[in-house]
Amino acid sequence: MPPCHGGGRGFESRPDRKISQISLGDFFLMKYYVYILYSESLDVYYKGFSTDVEKRLEYHLNSQHKFTSKTKDWVIVNVQEFEEKQEALQEENRLKKLNRKSIGKLIG
């Protein structure tokens, strides 16, 4: 009997067709972000959560979002990265409770 189990078809034993093992280090880990936007014209901060801050900023600048559609001068002033979604959501909630002075200290 040939060394492969395919009865001599040949494809099972070809090294270039073997499936390589994947280590945990090869997996993509999703990152979660809590961000603070600032509008100079409104002189106000907006706090939010996203997996893609740049895309989220574009959404705020170009959409009909209830609050951020009032102006088009939003800029990112602070971003925090988290590996766990729950941690990011907790931080977003904490930021939303901060007063203006505390936010100013946070963003420096």
Image (tube, rainbow, N blue to C red):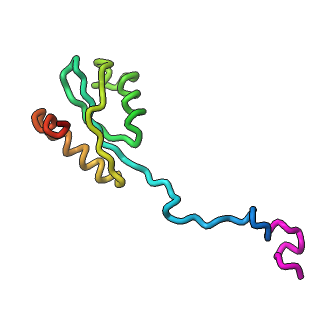
Secondary structure of the magenta portion, mostly? loop
Above-or-below relation of 9 to 83:
below
Residue in the foreground of this view, choosing between 64 and 28: 28
Question: In the rendered image, which quarter is residue 3 located in?
Answer: bottom right
What residue lies at 22% left-to-right and 20% top-to-bottom? 40
Residue 47 placement (x, y as % from top left):
25, 36
Question: In the rendered image, which quarter is residue 95 located in?
Answer: top left
What stretch of residues is rendered in magenta? 1-12
Is residue 21 found inside the magenta-colored segment of the image?
no
What residue lies at 29% left-to-right and 53% top-to-bottom? 87
Is residue 8 found inside the magenta-colored segment of the image?
yes
Above-or-below relation of 60 to 87:
above
How many numbered marks does the figure carry? Answer: 0
If the image is split into quadrants, where does the C terminus sit?
top left
Above-or-below relation of 92 to 69:
below
Residue in the foreground of this view, choosing between 94 and 29: 29
Residue 99 placement (x, y as % from top left):
11, 36
Question: In the rendered image, which quarter is residue 41 located in?
Answer: top left
Above-or-below relation of 33 to 4:
above
Residue 42 placement (x, y as % from top left):
21, 19
Residue 106 placement (x, y as % from top left):
17, 40
If the image is split into quadrants, where does the N terminus sit?
bottom right
What residue lies at 72% left-to-right and 66% top-to-bottom? 18
* Outermost bottom residue: 1
Q: Left of 81 or right of it: where is 44?
A: left
What residue lies at 24% left-to-right and 31% top-to-bottom? 46
